Image (cartoon, helix red, strand yellow):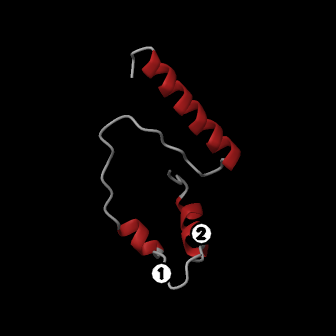
Amino acid sequence: MVCSEAVLHRQRVESRTPDIDGLELPSWNDVVSRAYEPWDREHLVLDTAGCSLDDLLGRAESYVRDKMASSQDGRF
């Protein structure tokens, strides 16, 4: 999952509240300073900017259905 809109992403990070007592959430600086390793194989990317949860769920379900169909056809 990604959020391609930096302003929205920052707003989400900074407005989060922990749902576990004592859990310290990462700051915006922690998020943007983190080292990320790129994926080296095909994968699903869901961009949460401007999409509803239902839309994201539909995309994920379609991806899984397509992969399952491909594996049954010997293409996976």
Residue 41, placed above or below residue 46? above
Amino acid type, callout 1: Glu
The residue that mark 2 highlights is 11
Task: Please tell me whether mark 2 or mark 1 is closer to you in this view.
Answer: 1
Q: Amino acid at mark 2?
A: Gln
Q: Residue at x 59, y 35 (%)?
A: 61
Whether residue 31 sits left or right of residue 19 in the image: it is: left
51 or 62: nearer the eye? 62
Name the disc covering residue 36, or none.
none
Contact? badges 2 and 1 (CB < 8 Å) = no
Q: Is residue 67 above or below residue 34?
A: above
Q: Give the total of numbered labels.
A: 2
- Is 55 situated left or right of 63 in this image? right
x 57%, y 63%: residue: 7
| Residue 24 tag number | 1
- Closer to the camera, 70 or 7? 70
Q: What is the x, y in percent for residue 8?
A: 59, 62
**Marks 2/1: CA distance?**
17 Å
Residue 48 in view here: yes
In the structure shown, which secondary structural element does the residue marked by tag 2 occupy? helix
Q: In the rendered structure, which disc, 2 or 1, sits on the residue that comes first in sequence?
A: 2
